[in-house]
Amino acid sequence: MKVDARALRAAYDFLRIVAFPECKRMPAGRHVEFVAKKLVNHGYHSEHEGTHTIWVDTKATQDVSLLLKIMAHEMIHVALTAVDSAYSDASNKFAHDENFKQMARAVEHEMGWKKGSV
């Protein structure tokens, strides 16, 4: 499977409509930068001066299901940053706090994914 910025934007826009319909402050895919490259981890999110960037690993991401789960994970960071700027730093101790976990469970439920997969 070819993972490139265009595929990442399509996955983001799909999930924004299907899994995050209540997140009105989440930016449309055209306002997010997407980077597909070999990474140490599956994905990263950062926010700088209001611009979100999502990186996804191209080596380990070999199927659509994993791509969507990685994207959903990073999108939770985007959604939480839109609500509270304390989430904008990925190294922040709040990055995977209870709010993150609750949102992850809601997305997993909405998408029919196993608990803990996002």
Image (cartoon, helix red, strand yellow):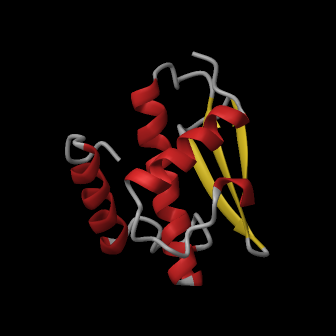
Residue 85, image x, y percentages: 59, 82
Q: Quadrant of the N terminus?
A: top right
Judge left or right: residue 76 versus residue 89: left
> Residue at (79%, 75%) from the top-left corner?
49
Residue 48 coordinates in the image, percent (x, y): 76, 70
Q: Position of residue 78 (x, y in %)?
A: 55, 65
Residue furthest right as drawn: 49
In this view, the residue in front, 111 or 74, is 111
Q: Position of residue 25 (x, y in %)?
A: 55, 75
- Asked if residue 45 is positioned above or below residue 89 in the image, the reply reads above
In this view, the residue in front, 22 or 35, is: 22
Quarter residue 20 falls in:
bottom left
95 relative to 37, above or below:
below
Query: Which image quarter: residue 9?
Result: top right
The quarter of the displayed image where residue 65 is located: top left
- Which residue is pictured at 35% across the width and 47% down the height? 118
- Count the marks: how many? 0
Which residue is the extreme one toward the top?
1
Q: Residue at x 51, y 82 (%)?
A: 83
User: As rendered, which of 17 and 2 lies closer to the eye?
Assistant: 17
Q: Does 32 appear above or below 47?
A: above
- Residue pictured at 63% horizontal, 66% vertical: 27
